[in-house]
Amino acid sequence: MKNQSMENTENMEKSLWDRFPDGSWDRRPFRKICCMSVLCTALLFTACQAEDAQAPNDGVVESVSPEDVQTPDSTEAAETEPAAAPDTEPSGEEEANTADAPEESSEVTISSQPATSVSITMQTPDKTELTDDNGTLYYTSEYSYPVVSIEGNDAAADKINADILAEMDNLYAAGETTADDALEWLQSIISDGDSVEDFFRAYSVSASYNIQRADDSVISFTIYTYTDMGGAHGDYTISGVTYDTQTGEKLTLSELSGDPDAFHSATLAYNQALAQTEAFSERMYTTDDITNGTLENVLYAEGAWYLSEAGLVFFSNPYALGPYASGAIEFIIPYKDLADMGFKEQYGYSGRMIMPLEEKQELTVDLNGDGAEDTLFFYSESAYSDDGSYKMANHLTINGTDFADTVAETLPADAWASIALYDLNTDDEYLDIALPVVFADGDTYTPHSFFFRYETDGALTYLGKVKEDVTDPAAAFTELTP
């Protein structure tokens, strides 16, 4: 029988289809990027109070590094240690879901990331709760930031840490203004004789740095800020900041190339071509913005880019190019393409490639190392069986062959997947495919990622899974389970 949380999520989806019957909203950002709306609502209906059952910090990543994952146990910065591999023993439910999965290939070797002099410690979140004289809570906040260490280069680390603290001062100051506004609104409700319970909800603010790349060349973060001021939903923004590891200086976009004007023109043409595709254009208000200067103004604003393990990422925040339901729209230019645009070799990347893809984004890439490029395309659609049960069809198409049935044999029937390229072993010729999903695991909603490999004979092989969303920088694992 369908659980209440899934039914509620479906109702939300149907509501959006009623509002956008032409399909102009995208289910993937609604589920993943805007997970605060979906998962938190689902968890409310299941009355799950466990902290690990909530969408982590409204989408915020904590205590992560591309090479190691650290969980500090005090407010003091500590030397980072690699995280232990997560417990990935399958539950009984998982075993049932994968009982008919294709036979697993030979053992997969998962290579480690290259050694680096950089270590990053996420400080224990600074939490605040403010109440008025009557004990009414009117404001909460939570801030988290990193401390960078670079072996043999304290000067560069000091520059980066000083810049981070300066930005934190700005975030704290903005939070204090929000707290003052919350108290003023609460007092006005009381003075008007209105019910505080009916007309007031405490304001909240959170901010956190998320590590996107950290090595001997580049340290790149995104800063996620979320503000709830009592409206229908909170608002979030993302900003990017990137440093030269050797100098500690903050990098501008123009400093990524020896010819800034040519680099700007080449990357803009690439982004415009992406925006013309269905995967991106259906999430935008209008395709006119692609060429009328709006796209360029949004993507080339200060802080609207960062360097990841996939490439140079440009992004727009909600409402900039599309509605809130479209989420933050990311335009990724892989490093292999940047090389032809004048991207400086010193900022190149040699670690594991992890590249999330959009639904309906056609990508041409060599998946199996045979020298021929493969065309990859993915989308999900919901459906109802004749008995009324809910199911998902996740269409993974490679070179014109739809492997939806192969995927269905592996994923739970109600799993709404996204897709990413993930290089499990940087020493072999394969570029593997990960399908991250979030589904009920007992009383909690748990992220999983299912891995597949496109073989040279055209077959799709299931490799195994992990209890992680591998597109999350916090993900850390050393093996796959069946």
Image (cartoon, helix red, strand yellow):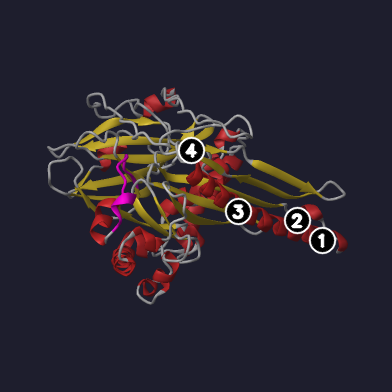
Question: Dividing the picture into quarters, in which one does residue 44 lie?
Answer: top right
Q: Which residue is mark 4?
A: 64
Q: Which residues are magenta?
A: 343-355
Residue occupied by mark 2: 200
Give the x, y percent position of residue 244.
42, 50
Q: Which numbered disc, 1 or 3, marks the residue that appears first in the sequence?
A: 3
* Residue depth check, mark 2 versus mark 4: number of the one nearer the observer: 4
Q: Earlier in the sequence, mark 1 or mark 2?
A: 1
Instruction: Single out the mark in the foreground, 4 or 3.
Output: 3
Residue denoted by label 1: 189
| Secondary structure under the numbered disc 1 in the rendered image | helix
Examine the structure image and report whether residue 140 is included in the region drawn in magenta.
no
Q: Nearer the viewer, mark 1 or mark 3?
A: 3
Label annotation for residue 481: none
Magenta span contains residue 354: yes
Q: Could you say which quadrant of the image residue 329 lies in?
A: bottom left
Which structural element holds mark 3? helix
Asked if marks 1 and 2 touch (Cβ < 8 Å), the reply is yes
